[in-house]
Amino acid sequence: MKIKERSLLCESQHQRSDKKYFILLFFVSVLLYSAVIFKVKTILWGDSLYYYAYTKSMVIDHDIDFKNEAYRISDGFPNEPEVSEVTGKVINKFSPGTSIFWIPGFVLGHAASSILEAVDIIKNIDGYNFVTQYVVAVSAICFSTLGLFFSYKTIKLFFDRKTALLITLFLYLTTQMFYYTSIDPLNSHSSSFMLSSLFLYLLAFFSKTRNLSWQKMITFGFIGGAMVLVRNQDIVLLVPASLYFLTKNGGILNREGLMEMINRMILFWGSIFLILSIQMFITLDLYGIVGSPYIIGGEKLSWFKPDFIRVLFSFENGLFTFAPIIIISLIGLLLASNNVSKSQQQAVLFRHLSLISIFAFLLQLYVVASWGREIIGGPYGSRMFISILPYLSLGLALVIKRYKNHRNFKWATFIGLALLFANNLAQTAIMLIRF
């Protein structure tokens, strides 16, 4: 009994210590971001102006009407505002999920601005002043940090804490997460990464029990719905999870299991569409019809001509070019059938999660490769794959575990981390110079 108590105490101390690392990572990211905006002299640019317009309009104007935001001289829409012929309203094709997550930061920043205005430190508190924008950006950095923390917790369910911490460091420094955490956090990617990491963690944590209760299925549905509300394409990540829910405990092999399976799907997808009804309402209000704003706006998906080569290997935004570590991660997922985890039950669960991760990656790849060529993959290392990074980190963890006892492991890890981070910085610098 004393040994067990000592083990639990040691584990508790490690958890408190590990949280300090993520708090430190958060403050380092805030410091780096502050240095960036000091250099570029602006906080909002590009897509962030569209997301921010939602937040400001909802909080200050109490509506979803962008005529007060779209035509601003300095912080207006970067492209010529478009007006719906049906509703007469300025349209905004970007999903509202990110903007909803920014509301707490916006409210806090606006409250701080109001106090500063009362003592004559600042004058403009229309929602676009520096203080409000900066607090919103810091809240987005917090989302990225939470995403890294949930990824760490997921890996720690199957591997030791040192491996989990190392994988987290690789995720931050050698993938798109560095740019979208410490340089340009005011985008949808911090929110989508956090939600995806949380979804995967709960999927792994809840699956350790035999039954998935109705409360758990609703929880999965709400988080999954939020993921899709932030980035519509992330609905493909929910397909492998649905198949897993269908087959868990042999759900389709007997009548009782079949009814349980049907109930799971109703609760899961019902909760998802309950959250998505927010976007349906907003799209109807802005466009006068229900549908994808991207498709309504004329963007196309070339399902029969996906451009895999450019998405994966182009110098401009290739996924493997920008983050070669993902290749190693995929190899690790393919090797997961030979994984020996802490227990046989966990080994089986890890194999299931690996299959889910591979399937999710392939679906995401197909969607991105089929998207319009002008935005294919997005800049800065195919940013549209950020929500899949928590899944891919499982494969990297398995590779690290296999080779961590090799005599040259420490040197190889250090050199690999340095080279991959240098590649990340170099390509990011090129993109910043170009855009």
Image (spheres, grey):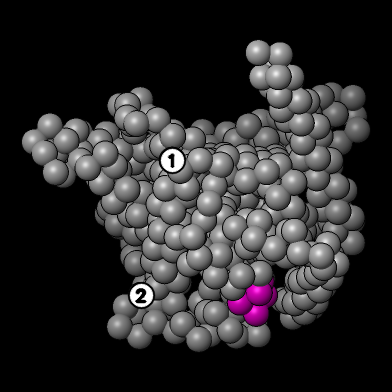
Q: Amino acid at mark 1?
A: Gln
Q: Is residue 101 above or below residue 383?
A: above
- Relative to 383, is 93 on the left or the right? left
Q: Secondary structure at mark 1?
A: helix
Packing grade of label 1 (10 A; few <14, some 14-19, many >=20) is: few
Residue visible at 30% across and 83% down in the picture: 304
Q: Is residue 323 above or below residue 84?
A: below
Q: Is residue 214 above or below residue 174?
A: above
- Numbered range of the magenta stretch: 320-324
**For residue 321, what is the image quadrant?**
bottom right
Q: Is residue 208 visible?
A: yes
- Relative to 52, is 166 on the left or the right? right
Location of residue 140 in the rendering, given as x and y in whole percent from the top left corner: 67, 45
Location of the N terminus by quadrant is top right
Location of residue 307 in the rendering, given as x and y in whole percent from the top left corner: 44, 84
Location of residue 34 in the rendering, given as x and y in whole percent from the top left corner: 86, 51
In this view, the residue in front, 125 or 216, is: 216
The circle drawn on residue 298 is none
Packing grade of label 2 (10 A; few <14, some 14-19, many >=20) is: some
Mark 2 → mark 1, Cα distance in angstroms = 41 Å
Q: Determine if the magenta segment contains residue 307.
A: no
Location of residue 222 in the rendering, given as x and y in whole percent from the top left corner: 40, 36
Provide the residue designation for mark 2: 301
Q: Amino acid at mark 2?
A: Leu
- Relative to 234, is 185 on the left or the right? right
Provide the residue designation for mark 1: 345
Among the two numbered marks 2 and 1 on one chain, the one whose residue lies closer to the N terminus: 2
In this view, the residue in front, 4 or 295, is: 4
Q: Are marks 2 and 1 in contact (CB under 8 Å)?
A: no
- Relative to 330, is 271 on the left or the right? left
Q: Is residue 275 above or below residue 374?
A: above
Q: Is residue 288 visible?
A: no
